[in-house]
Image (tube, rainbow, N blue to C red):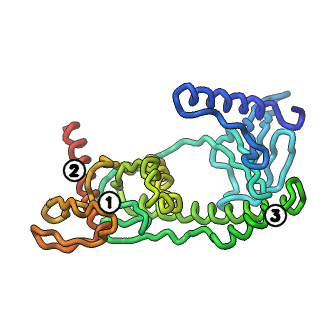
Amino acid sequence: MKEVDSCALRNSLFNLEDAYKRFYNGNGYPRFKVKGVHEGYKTNNVKSSYKGNNYNSIKLDLKNKTITLPKLKEVKIRGYRNKEVVPGEVKSAVIKKDAGKYYVSVLIEEELIRPAFVPTSIIGIDLGIKDLIVTSFNDKIENNIKLNTKRMIGLQKGISRCKPGSKNRYKMKLKIQRLYQKIRNARKHMIHDITNKLINENDIIVTENLDVKSMQKNHYVAKGLNENPISEIIRLLKYKANFNNKKLIQIDRYYPSSQICSVCDYQNREVKDLSIRKWKCPVCHTEHERDFNAAVNIMFKGLEKYMKEIEQFI
């Protein structure tokens, strides 16, 4: 109890309260915080004044690359984004331990000035398994970040042979954590690059409102969905669109975007089979690539939804 500050203990109680609220709302049982799996805590910035001087329990000095935390005093950090000044007011900090390394995330409050929304371009994106993203401009983005399965199997075999509680088991566990961390960081970097490009180059982004949890129950596509972070892409697009005053439109998840011909609107129900990657429209005889055709239909459906929203205000 003496090793951590009072704000960390108080935040743990707040987390417990949130867990019970989610439980009573029907979101499952609370989970215990397991030591060695989810190691971290949150602390708040406490302001005080004494004899005309102002004090903060959390101080961030990016110029000298140090951070002051309660009961830790000054700690050296590597810095972030080559900034020298904190752009706002420090509110709290989350300290985590991952794969033997310590990370601190500082929450800063600053005034948000969003640019005016002037729609000049629109794009439809089809999120899938074969290709991570296919746009209505026929740009394809693949997921090149894959787990090294062979190495992971070798490490898992190695840790199963180690004696529980031994130093060799701890070393092997650290290797597994670092391998997963490497994949996570590479995947996170890829997702941010993709979403930044979509937000910066387009004013309206249209995508499907996918039910990923239900899709994962299909064992034919479950592995591909786990490797392709579809939910994370949609989550990042939502907050980045709001931050940059862009518009993200999500169409109905049951809209048959792959089955409809983007030229004559004929619906070919045979294309419901996922193995069909190319098909020819029997009415207008246009040859379609499945994902590109779906992205075009998603774009037009999103544009139709946007025009209906505008008509309500006219």
- Disc 1 to disc 3, how far (Cα)? 50 Å
Q: Is residue 199 left or right of residue 101?
A: left
Q: Quadrant of the C terminus?
A: top left
Image quadrant assignment for residue 300:
bottom left
Q: Position of residue 196 (x, y in %)?
A: 48, 60
Question: Which mark is nearer the camera, 1 or 3?
Answer: 3
Amino acid on which disc 2 is placed: Glu
Q: Position of residue 190 (x, y in %)?
A: 54, 65
Q: Earlier in the sequence, mark 1 or mark 3?
A: 1
Amino acid on which disc 1 is placed: Gly
Could you tell me which residue is drawn at 41 percent across and 65 percent down?
A: 133
Amino acid on which disc 3 is placed: Arg
Q: Which residue is mark 1?
A: 124
Quick one: label 3, few (<14), some, or many (20+) residues within 10 Å? few
- Of residues 241 and 28, the one drawn nearer to the viewer in this rendering: 28
Secondary structure under tag 1 reads strand
